[in-house]
Image (spheres, rainbow, N blue to C red):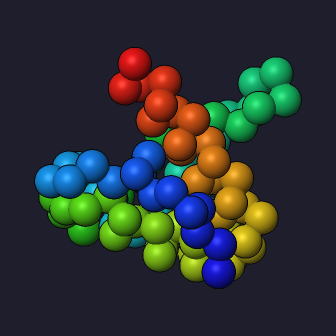
Amino acid sequence: AYLPQDLSAFVVAGSYAYLHTDLHKDHLFLTKTNGEWEITGILDWGDSIYGDPFYELATIHADLFHCDLFLLKNFLKSYAEFSDAYQR
């Protein structure tokens, strides 16, 4: 499995968030603009919880990415870049 060497971009001690817990293609609205896909909506928050953001990775990797390591790697890379920009 792919995991970055440094996971600090993904976890901040004590950082919790609202989690969907059931992200898959049937719950996402996507729009393609200028050749880039963007999430424009998320449905069905009935199973949402407040917890560790890592909880979402298993569902995203297995259900949304169909265990494709290339997609997981690029997702995590994009997340780290977003997280770095957001924290500045």
Residue at 62 percent across and 42 percent down: it is: 78
Q: Is residue 38 above or below residue 73?
A: above
Residue 14: x and y, percent?
15, 53
Q: 53 left or right of 27?
A: left
Q: Is residue 46 left or right of residue 1?
A: left
Q: Quadrant of the N terminus?
A: bottom right
Q: Nearer the viewer, residue 39 or 18?
A: 18
Q: Residue at x 46, y 58 (%)?
A: 7
Is residue 26 something one can see in this rendering? no
* Residue 51 falls in image quadrant: bottom left
**Residue 19 occupies quadrant:** bottom left
Q: Position of residue 17 (x, y in %)?
A: 22, 50
The mark total stands at 0
Residue 14 visible in the displayed image: yes
Quarter of the figure that contains the C terminus: top left
Most distant residue in the front direction: 5
Q: Looking at the image, which is closer to me, 48 or 68? A: 68
- For image coordinates 44% across by 46% down, the residue present is 9
